[in-house]
Image (cartoon, rainbow, N blue to C red):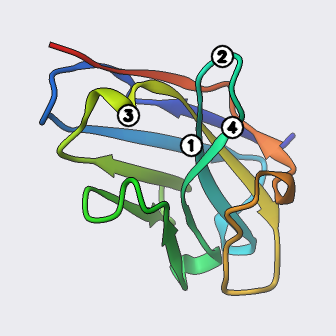
Amino acid sequence: QLQLVESGGGLVQPGGSLRLSCAASGFTLDYYAIGWFRQTPGKEREGVSCISRRGGSTHFADSVKGRFTISTDNVQNTVYLQMNSLKPEDTDIYYCAAYATRRFYCSGDVTAYDYWGQGTQVTVSS
């Protein structure tokens, strides 16, 4: 059974850092693109970052460029989202998602993703 489990969320002060993890089970990341999205209840889900199969390419939303990085650990079958210089507007529920692809490209479109984790809360506040 294909499953994604996020962890690493929490409360952090503005300017602080968090690292989110997306642990995959039931499939190997070699053949899947992974995306991170965030959502405030009542609003549309927003793409934050994605990484293609085998880490061939990455993409970042303009709002997080230069502050967030994304990486894959193939041994742990886990994707990480390192978030630095956090701002209050980064407060949201963060979700990871996956879709199978042969391309070394990842989509920022939420509708491209077939599998989703349960989400982890990130709160940036003093």
Q: Quick check: 70 left or right of 117?
A: left
Q: Amino acid at mark 1?
A: Ala
Residue lying at 26% horizontally and 56% vertically, measured from the top left = 67
Residue lying at 37% horizontally and 55% vertically, measured from the top left = 64
- Inter-mark Cα distance, 2 to 1: 24 Å
Q: Does 11 sit above or below residue 5? A: above
Query: Dot 4: few (<14), some (14–19), or many (≥20) neighbours within 10 Å?
Result: some
Residue linked to disc 2: 41
Which of disc 4 and disc 3 is earlier in sequence? 4
Residue lying at 75% horizontally and 60% vertically, measured from the top left = 109
Q: Does 65 sit above or below residue 19? A: below
- Inter-mark Cα distance, 3 to 2: 14 Å
Task: Give coordinates of residue 52: x percent, y percent.
Answer: 62, 75
Q: Amino acid at mark 3?
A: Asp
Q: Amino acid at mark 4?
A: Arg
Q: How many callouts does the rendering have?
A: 4
Mark 1, secondary structure of its residue = strand
Mark 4, secondary structure of its residue = loop
